[in-house]
Image (cartoon, helix red, strand yellow):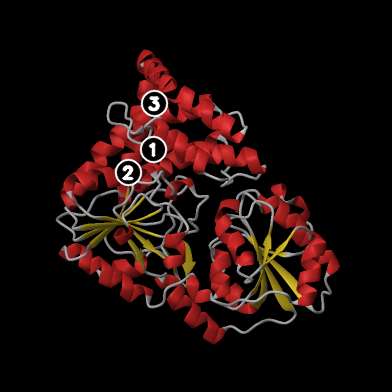
Amino acid sequence: MELDAFLEIEHKYGLIHDKLDGFAYWTYFRRDLAGDIMKKLDSGGELYVYPERSIGQQTLARLGTIKYALLYGRCPKGKHDMLILNAERRGWSQDHYECIYTDRIASEYPGSAVMERPYFQKHYRPVKTGNLFYTDPIEIKAMVHWYSRQLFHSKQLAGIRETLHRKIRKPMEEIGKAYQVKCDIERILDNMVCGYYVYQTKRKELGRVLDRLAPRIILEVVGYNIDCMIINELAQERRIPTVELQHGVTGAAHIAYNYYPGTKVKQFPQYFFAFSKFWIDTARYPLAPGNLREIGFPHLDEKAKAVKNKVSKSFPRQILFISQPKIGEMLSDIAVDLNELIDAEQYRIVFKLHPGEYERWRERYSRLSASGIEVIDNSRVDLYELFAASVYQIGGDGSTATFEGLVFDLKTYIMRAGAYPAVASLCEKGMARFFDSARDLYQLILADSSEAEQKSNFWKENALENMKREIDAIMSGSSG
């Protein structure tokens, strides 16, 4: 999805800076709207497959939230130099679950506290993260506030909805015309009204967290999450520097990292630590160039070296499919069709699901389920070991894993349909090849027509040292 029209229209109406009782309604939900448009334009799947739960399972999940709140929801006492908002979707590492983006840096700074939001109403345990606390108590308060307003203040809700409707109707109509789609204004309004009340509670409670910990710096992952956005607002008021650690593909098509030139966004972090200059150059961040830093990815640095020393390329030659929810159905069909074309004595296929696909994949990808292809449907299998054992990787959409695979010199093939501009650029640079069907892919593999070169463009080396140096400079006030 090309974003110029979207950015121009929201700038025309001043939506980024407009507020309702302090709530920057558009800034918090522009990604929701852009995602809805993108889905209609490319007919892709969902970003995540949400669990289907019975009433009993929903009740148990709610009880689990209370358990997490009681056992792990207490904010640490005293001041802490650093507050880290980690990635709640942890991965398995030997004997515990880790946040691959923040656990290493947290261990380097003993004076840090780590705050974790729930992942589909649960948390991954066991963990080794020190000074860890969960936001479940805040989630409970926010939901109680929202449900009580629905029950006892329906007129107030209706008034807020009507006010928001007046504010967004014209710009949404223009955006719809620009992309030739019908925007679901009722759904967006539902989310905005809920967000209005959730924001009120979370802003108050997260403000208390900041005042209690009084951090000198805040690190965050997934800066467009509502908790991070609220923290960024609060931190700016308290003059606490905020830093987002890159966790995935950014690029010109990712609405969360693209704003109209010159726009200042209070909900955006003050610094962005990118994997490399390549990622800095591919998006229109609402930051001064000096606040965009080339860092690298410490987890990749460490794991790639270790895995390369212990895992060899497999035979039959392994073809690794890297799936994502939006393209999973199409990609799984291609994997099944390719499996019928290849010589099983020469090649074997492994299909790695994205964590957002783990739920109900067997019913959603029925052909894949019945194909006999090995499917990785959990986070306990090391992705880097799969890379190290493979010769080919097959991907598409906007997966960061595709770029990680280049570190392992994998021959790379990209499904053309729905490929993000940043991923498509690999083909433009000659580092990968597009394919449109299983037959195309089969011919490309037989020809071995792909080269994994220039991988350093995407990952700056010595990432942990780079990150520590930049953090220290920001905390000391010597960073520009």
The amino acid pointed to by label 2 is Val
Say which residue appears at 60% left-offset and 52% top-offset. 357
Say which residue appears at 56% left-offset and 43% top-offset. 50
Q: Quadrant of residue 10?
A: top left
Mark closest to the chain's N terminus, 1 or 2 = 1
**Mark 2 crowdedness (10 Å alpha carbons): few <14, some 14-19, many ≥20:** some
Quarter of the C terminus within the rendering = bottom left
Give whichever of 414, 101 is nearer the camera. Answer: 414
Give whichever of 326, 89 is nearer the camera. Answer: 326
Number of numbered tags placed on the structure image:
3
Say which residue appears at 58% left-offset and 45% top-offset. 1
Q: Secondary structure at mark 1?
A: helix
What whole-number distance in Å separates the C-alpha atoms at marks 2 and 3?
A: 30 Å
Q: Which mark is residue 44?
A: none
Give whichever of 475, 360 is nearer the camera. Answer: 475
Q: Secondary structure at mark 3?
A: helix
What whole-number distance in Å separates the C-alpha atoms at marks 1 and 2?
A: 8 Å
What whole-number distance in Å separates the C-alpha atoms at marks 3 and 1?
A: 23 Å
Drawn side of residue 345 relative to residue 89, left or right:
right
Where does residue 136 sit, x and y in percent of width and height? 35, 44
Mark closest to the chain's N terminus, 3 or 1 = 1
Q: Which mark is residue 27?
A: 1
**C-beta proximity under 8 Å, tags 1 and 2:** yes
Drawn side of residue 155 relative to residue 113, left or right:
right
Give whichever of 23, 460 is nearer the camera. Answer: 460
Q: Which mark is residue 265?
A: 2
Instruction: Name above or below for residue 363 compared with residue 168.
Output: below
**Mark 3 crowdedness (10 Å alpha carbons): few <14, some 14-19, many ≥20:** some
Mark closest to the chain's N terminus, 2 or 3 = 3
